Image (cartoon, helix red, strand yellow):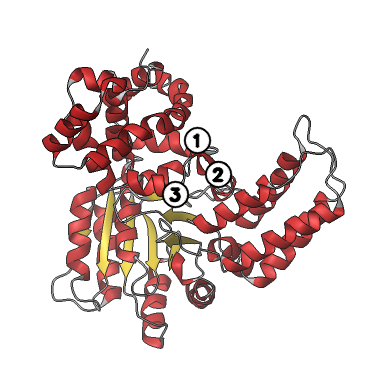
Amino acid sequence: MLESFTQRITDIFSNITKKNIVSEKDVDNLLKEIRYALLDADVHYTVVKQFIENIKEKAIGSKLYGTLNAEQSFIKIVRDEITTLLGNNPVPINWGNAPPTVILMCGLQGSGKTTTTAKLARWFIKQNKKVVLSACDVQRPAAIKQLQVLGEEVGAKVFTVEDNKNPLEIATKAYEYTKHMLNDVLIIDTAGRLTIDDELMHELKSIYQKLQPQETFLVLDGSTGQEALNVANSFHSVVNATGVIFTKLDGDTRGGAVLSVKNQTGLPVRFIGLGEGVEALDEFYPDRMAGRILGMGDMLGLIKKAEETISAQDAQSAEQMFKNKQVDFNLILTQIQFIKKMGSIKNIVKYIPGMNRMVKPEMLDSLDSSGFLSMESIIQSMTPDERKNPQIIKSSRKKRIAKGCGRTVEEVNQLIKHVDQMKDAFKRFSGMENKFKMFNFK
């Protein structure tokens, strides 16, 4: 998310000269660039104004924090202000006094509400909760079928009432079913519209008043910019939402609403969607997100994602892999397969401190999706000796490898060239070694 903003901020920070005290002139120049970057990311202008004023007040004359240099001091101030802007602390789930805990999902059509409903169900199931999904979107064609398919994928029961077009009746019966079956969580997927209208709000309000959900999550499209704030205020005034889930933040969206929503609506961000897969939902931690936005990474988030996605056998192999300091094609192949299980390489890189400076965007493009398939096929076309000793791969071997996997010699050359570039990048993963030990793999 906010990739262009992150890159611009990184460039701004890299221009700070190392000095014990940041002068007022230094601050003015830096804040001017940060202001432009925030506005270009579509952060609300009143938020930008207050944000800049807060930083300037804290930064002028600020001395080093301990052993930090001026650049790091300024970055710390900016990071702390972004964390405050995002809400400071994560908001835990408001569990009901007795099961089931009811969660009402609302939002406009096209925001990704139904998919997010399934993602949220998966998140609860990972915590050993029994989840029921209530299909109350009777407006959009195939919405119920979509929820049923997604529910089966994540392992959640989908409650439907055939030929019933009354969302309130469906939601009420779903609640009774969930309670009778002693399930823990009921998530209600409601209908959306292309725009806010009276019918939509009346339907939503009737369900809200009847079931009194513990959580009401508003699903917002992160690519819609400041319009998302208007949508949030409209829904919040009707159903008293308890939080926002932003979707479609896996690309280079402007995404400024993420930085503006808490300040402008009072609603905390609770989760963010970073992809289409049902696993692509992250719990929102303001401090961690501030680090990712500023290109400082989020190793705790990466570790948690690893815990959720890799098996015990994979973790054992990974622990051994990170102990091996020799970078060859066997290691790279293992790492590619490991990272693929955790999602898009572009998203994974954002978790790793300093990686945005080390790995160029064009390199990430070559590593993602089809690039992974290309790399795997090339490596699998090599002999064991070639995988272990890349330096022996000369002209004749390159031609044979390219022919064996249906790729070009240029692609083989490019992969060989990347070996050294990837060496330092993949070493960053070695910090996860201690965490793998916590899995009891000694």
Determine whether, in the image, residue 202 is placed left or right of residue 375. Answer: right
The residue shown at (73%, 67%) is: 49
Label 3 secondary element: helix
Crowding near the residue tagged with mark 1, few <14, some 14–19, many ≥20 C-alpha atoms within 10 Å: some
Label 2 secondary element: helix
Measured as percent of width and height from the top left, residue 8 is found at 59, 55
Residue at (54%, 51%) from the top-left corner?
91
Taking the image as drawn, is residue 2 in sight?
no
The circle drawn on residue 292 is none
User: Which label sits on residue 361?
Assistant: 3
What crowding class fits label 3: few (fewer than 14 Cα within 10 Å), some (14-19), or many (20 or more)?
A: some
- Callout in the foreground (3, 2): 3
Give how far apart the Cα atoms at labels 1 and 3 are: 23 Å
Image location (x, y in percent) of residue 101? 39, 54
Residue topped by disc 1 = 300
Number of other residues with Cα within 10 Å of mark 2, as a class: few under 14, some 14 to 19, many 20 or more: some
Above or below, comparing residue 105 to residue 327 in the picture: below
Question: Percent x, y for residue 194?
Answer: 36, 81
Question: Which sits in the foreground, 57 or 97?
Answer: 57
